[in-house]
Image (cartoon, rainbow, N blue to C red):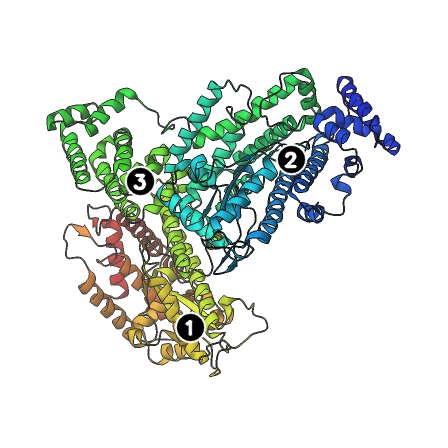
Amino acid sequence: MHTFPVTENVSPELLAIGERHWQALTEHHSFNPQWQVHEAQICQVFALSDFVARQCIQHPQFIDELLTPFSQQPSEPDYTELLKSALSDVTDEDQLHKTLRLFRHLHMARITLADVTNTQTIEDSLYRVSALSQALIVQASLWLRTQLSARFGLPMGELGEQHMYIIGMGKLGGRELNFSSDIDLIFTYPEQGMTQGGRKSIEHQQFFTKLAQKLITALHQITVDGQVYRVDMRLRPFGESGPLVMHFAAMEDYYQEQGREWERYAMVKGRVLNPDDTYYPEIADILRPFIYRRYLDYSALDSLRKMKAMIKKEVRRRQLSNNIKLGQGGIREAEFIVQSLQLIRGGREPALQEQGLLYNLQLLIDMEILPSKDATALKHSYLWLRKVEHCLQQFDDKQTQVLPDNDIDKLRLCTILGLKDYQEFSAQLAEHTGVIHEQFLLLIGEEAAPELDKDDYALSPLEDLWLLPLSTEEREELLGQWLNQEQAQPFSHALGEFADSLSASRIGQRGENILNKLIPQLLLIILQQSPDTASQSLNRCLQVFRAIYGRTAYLDLLFENQGALKQLVSLCSSSPWVTDQISRFPLLLDELLNPAQLVNPTELTEYDAELRLAMLRVDETDLEQQMEALRQFKLCQQLKIAAADTTGVLPVMKVSDHLTFLAQSIIRQVVNLAWQQMTEKYGEPDYPQDPTEQHDMLSRGFAVIGYGKLGGYELGYGSDLDLVFLHNCTSRAATNGPKSIESGLFYLKLAQRILHLFNTKTASGNLYEVDMRLRPSGSAGLLVCHIDGFSEYQTQTAWTWEHQALTRARFIVGSPNLAQAFSVVRHQILAQKRDLKPLQESVTQMREKMRKHLGSSSKTGFDLKQDSGGIADIEFIVQYYVLAYAWEFPALTKWPDNVRILHQLKASELLSSQDTELLAEAYLTYRNTNHRLVLQQVEQAPDGGEFSALREGVVRIWQQIFAEL
């Protein structure tokens, strides 16, 4: 809430003005002597507002109403009901005009009194002015419609009676109307036809045109009682040359075929003032695709910048100095900041499609689109200017945003704002406009690409390189200041190939124009950041450009945000895997906008909360959107992990932790979604209930078990998920939904639904590859297994390799009871006492089989996973020890990850300290190297000797354990 000091001390100069107005009031024949008790209070208000004084002198009956402040009323004034009551006895249009004007003057005087005495916040004032305006417009329209329908009948349609919908634009649409504003309106109606039920039937177009004309007259015409509002209809389709009112189909055709960028900007604040449940939703369906794009729309910035330039020219031409709305750092710039972000992001973030600036500013903070500190300062400065604007207009009910040039109004302004003099006001004004203008420049700037440090000398030859038809020698010569001839040749060749590919594509003029400005900047950044690998970096960046050059929104994003362009070069230079990800899924470019946030991955404990927040922004009834949102979340978070990894911000040991926790959160959300969809269709199964268990969707007789890398907290980039599904339902009872099925079958269908959510390919690909082959009986087994059946299978049927796999299995999500039951089964199986000789044979035979089929035949490379002395050898050693000795050392079954099991082997003295440290070092080194190889899209590590000592150590330990075989 933005408050100001309550006005107490009014200067003698102002009090003299108030006393003169009071004297004029006392001379009115309707003056009530009882008002003299309130003389001091009334004089103070009269001193600060000639408008209030004039209205009270002309209409003394207002005094009693004014003496009851808002704070003493039992509830917020309901202008609609109050106006309905006032219009109930009106019988002709002259009476209508008078009633509307008196109603407006009375309630505007009440709002002014609260403002100049600072007994209401500026937010409340903006809301009340807007609510009053809406009531006057809508109720006047309803009264006039009733009069017209008596003669011509009513326009009817498929859904019944048709209305003329009134779209309030600008601050009226945003519920932030300034005090003496004019009102921008657009009128529309559903469909053409003939009116029904009147003495004379006319076309709907005629009926609504008559209604529109009468409404404008009722509001706009100046009578002896003044005016309600100045009505501006120039924002309607085709402007002043267009029809006064349009039917839906014609309006849709206009905006689809002829709508201009400034109309998109204006429509951001468009709001239907008289919505209903019949035809009104169609209006949103017409306007939403025109205003908002489904992608991040950075093309809006260029249009907004041009609009701002036009306004600046108008300010200069009309010599609008000291204009707090249009001047530098004024109200309009604050509106530009919020509305441009709405245009850019509103298609992807439907919550931003609301009209109010203050509401959207808070959303931008909540969504972390604007930094909280900056946005709070922007809001504070914006409200301060709105307060000043209200003051200026409330002095005499005149629409002005120009600072006063007379001492009286300067004194009034300082009094209301609680400032000692106009010098202090000017200082505060400079501070607040400075805050707004700084934020405005950060977002929109005065010209394209404001963040780029343009070295004209350096950029000029690169513009020639891209735009001019040069020979090979000339191109290499231009590159000479950065690259030698050997480096320049592939660089020039890559650029030439890209240019040739453009000539064969349909990029469009706008895309070509942006590329012609963007490519030289890209080249300069590459040559400055990575001259030694310039051709490689260029090829990777151009791979991304080939994927997006038909989508100008992404080209705009990179051109308007030099930080994002630099981040793209950095990421592509560091990793072809990241390059492929961005090329396949250009939506990831959005993540480059905040470089600091990009390399700061989500905290491990926050993935669940971040995913829930992302899913809240999606329509919960739209499965396709939900599936896409899950995939986009995974891609964006994975990119942040990779960015932090490649830049060294995230230690490599933590990469798997982040990838694993990310996967766990997504699994949890997928199971949740699948359960919701299943229960909506079939109802809930008859699962065993435990009164101590928290009955949420993830604890109802179902569990997901993670094996392999997921189970061992060792997921890598692009890893699949080894999953097993368990349930504990023994009932054959039917589910309790509209389409009931047997409870056991419910869990099978639930498993199928979960796999569908994971495996379905959307625009953002599939979610994860899911491998279910580790379930009982493998591919031949049921998708979901009862916990008792799982236990029986593991006890009686499972092979040794399946018990090995169980060492890396853990509960991921589901019923706490099942989690405990699985833990018991897992421990019982792993802690069985086994004959060592057969166990050694089984383990070594399986390892040899894997090495034969999966190992590397290369003599120069090292397959970190399968080659001798690699990851698989270490995993098999660890698994062997668990199966061999867990009966004697139960702590070996506690953890599913190899490093912590190695620590237990050391603590149990089953392996020497030297051997466990070597195995742990080798395992972590191999895993970390493997992350690097995946990011570089290299299958094998070069065996240049750096792994020799580790490999020899692992082989030595293997041979010691399995020597007798």
In the picture, the quarter occupied by the C terminus is bottom left
Q: Could you say which quadrant of the image residue 171 lies in? A: top right
Q: CA distance from mark 1 to mark 2?
A: 59 Å
Question: Mark 3 sits on what residue?
Answer: 552
Which residue occupies the extreme front position in the image? 199
Say which mark, if any, is on residue 726: 1
Instruction: Give the mark nearest the N terminus, 3 or 2.
Output: 2
Dot 2 falls on a residue whose secondary structure is helix
- Circle 3/circle 2 CB separation < 8 Å: no
Say which mark, if any, is on residue 101: none
Dot 3 falls on a residue whose secondary structure is helix
Instruction: Give the mark nearest the N terminus, 3 or 1.
Output: 3
Q: CA distance from mark 3 to mark 2?
A: 41 Å
Residue 133 in the image: state x and y as whole percent. 62, 40
Mark 3 or mark 1: which is in front?
Answer: 3
Dot 1 falls on a residue whose secondary structure is strand
Query: Which residue type does callout 2 highlight?
Result: Ile
Closer-to-camera residue (419/77)? 77
